[in-house]
Image: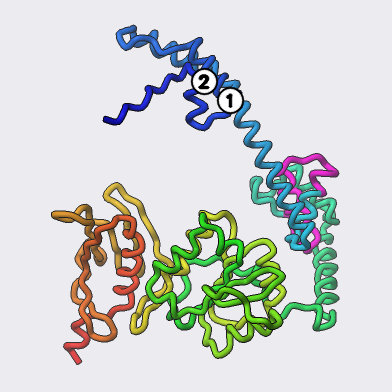
């Protein structure tokens, strides 16, 4: 027989440490619980509530200290991120202004962002508009940044003057030698993958993955790809910073210049949809070879945390089309009601209809008013059934997306009969 787990004793610091608390935090929590333990269940209600309020009051300084510590760590991490971007030469337009606000004016992170927004607005020739303040007002940090950027709140003609100066600077940039100008946006500036672009066939899709993300088991890139039917027809390229490019699954890159490797991998490809999943040195390496990438209808890049990138990759994978398959495009509006998850695309609504008998989960597609979406067929004349049953609830959202896009691309059967 398996032994039951030991009961949790809040007055024992070891129990808090076992739950992931730091030793100093655990000792503080245990001390408060020893000073203010729960009263017996048969004690008067007023006394038990008073004991709980006293314990909460005793814990308030501890919770406030944790909140302040988390805030300090957030600001430190944000400033460190800006410093790394500047050091790598990949700074955004107002990254330098953020550090300037910290170093010169002693602002915290939030105030530095407002300072940078005000300074950027002044340098670009825009009138002051602080969206963090009521209309017609500006926060002190934004106003300081606006003044440091050359703006003036009292001069009626200063907006026109700054706008003219900004236009002159842009003209000087545009007249620079062609070799110094970008003819297309770099992959690092591409937008995030969403479900809005039109689905495309796997044979016309290209995924360029950085070696670090591809080797990170927590990202789960390989697992997500191999679980997607049709992914083997896509062009999947691995980018290794400083080394080259090679096909997904190949042991080593071909002995050639990196540019020639990339040209060979993309040779003859008819690309509609291109995704870059990389960061750090791998992303900079892809940026250096951006001129070799094909211009196509949809060009996107994942970014931010591993969890966010997994969600963005899932949105990209869900847009893949198998041979002969027709799916509608457009953004799906999701709603999580008490009855379960539902999504809307055009006139169709797909929703979770509860458990199926004897096992499984029902998914239905309906029209406005809750009528079943009956009487529709694919472009090939195959009738569509407005209800399905899945055995694994983890596949609920993916199945709902496929059903919704199939019905949104379908045609009514009565049109065929009328013809």
Provide residue 380's location: percent of width, then percent of height. 27, 86
Q: Quick check: 118 left or right of 271? A: right
CA–CA distance in space, label 1 to label 2? 8 Å
Q: Magenta region's main secondary structure? A: helix
Few, some or many residues within 10 Å of mark 1 (<14, 14–19, 20+): some
Provide residue 131's location: percent of width, then percent of height. 65, 51
Few, some or many residues within 10 Å of mark 2 (<14, 14–19, 20+): many
Q: Which residues are magenta?
A: 100-128
Q: Is residue 299 visible?
A: no
User: Residue 235 has which mark?
Assistant: none
Q: Is residue 122 magenta?
A: yes
Q: Which residue is mark 1?
A: 23
Q: Quadrant of the C terminus?
A: bottom left
Above or below residue 241? Residue 230 is: below
Q: Which residue is mark 2?
A: 13
Disc 1 secondary structure class:
helix
Residue 94, located in which quarter of the rendered image? bottom right
Whether tag 1 and tag 2 are in contact, CB under 8 A, the answer is yes
Q: Is residue 136 visible?
A: yes
């Amino acid at each position: 027989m398996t032994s039951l787990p030991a009961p949790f004793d809040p007055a024992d610091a070891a129990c808090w440490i076992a739950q992931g608390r730091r030793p100093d935090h655990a000792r503080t929590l245990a001390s408060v619980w020893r000073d203010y333990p729960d009263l017996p269940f048969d004690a008067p209600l007023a006394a038990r509530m008073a004991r709980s309020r006293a314990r909460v009051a005793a814990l308030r300084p501890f919770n406030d200290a944790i909140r302040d510590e988390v805030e300090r760590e957030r600001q430190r991490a944000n400033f460190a991120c800006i410093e790394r971007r500047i050091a790598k030469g990949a700074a955004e337009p107002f990254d330098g202004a953020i550090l300037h606000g910290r170093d010169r004016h002693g602002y915290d992170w939030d105030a530095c962002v407002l300072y940078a927004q005000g300074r950027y607005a002044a340098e670009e020739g825009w009138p002051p508009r602080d969206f963090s303040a009521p209309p017609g007002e500006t926060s002190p940090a934004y106003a300081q940044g606006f003044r440091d950027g050359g703006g003036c709140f009292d001069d009626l003609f200063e907006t026109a003057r700054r706008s003219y100066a900004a236009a002159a600077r842009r003209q000087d940039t545009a007249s620079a030698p062609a070799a110094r100008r970008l003819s297309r946006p770099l992959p690092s500036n591409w937008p995030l993958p969403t479900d809005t672009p039109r689905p495309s066939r796997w044979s016309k899709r290209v995924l360029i993955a950085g070696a670090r993300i591809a080797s990170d088991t927590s990202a789960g890139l390989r697992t997500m790809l191999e679980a997607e039917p049709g992914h083997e027809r896509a062009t999947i390229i691995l980018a290794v910073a400083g080394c080259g490019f090679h096909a997904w699954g190949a042991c080593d890159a071909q002995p050639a210049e990196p540019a020639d490797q990339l040209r060979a991998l993309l040779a003859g490809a008819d690309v509609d949809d291109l995704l870059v999943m990389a960061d750090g040195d791998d992303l900079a390496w892809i940026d250096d070879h951006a001129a070799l990438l094909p211009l196509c209808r949809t060009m996107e890049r994942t970014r931010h945390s591993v969890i966010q990138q997994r969600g963005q990759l899932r949105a990209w994978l869900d847009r893949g089309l198998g041979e002969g398959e027709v799916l509608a495009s457009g953004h799906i509006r999701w709603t999580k009601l008490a009855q379960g998850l539902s999504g809307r695309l055009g006139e169709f609504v797909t929703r979770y209809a509860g458990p199926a008998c004897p096992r499984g989960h029902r998914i239905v597609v309906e029209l406005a008013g809750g009528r079943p979406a009956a009487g529709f067929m694919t472009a090939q004349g195959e009738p569509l059934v407005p209800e399905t049953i899945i055995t694994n609830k983890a596949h609920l959202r993916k199945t709902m997306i496929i059903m919704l896009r199939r019905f949104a691309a379908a045609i009514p059967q009565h049109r065929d009969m009328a013809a």
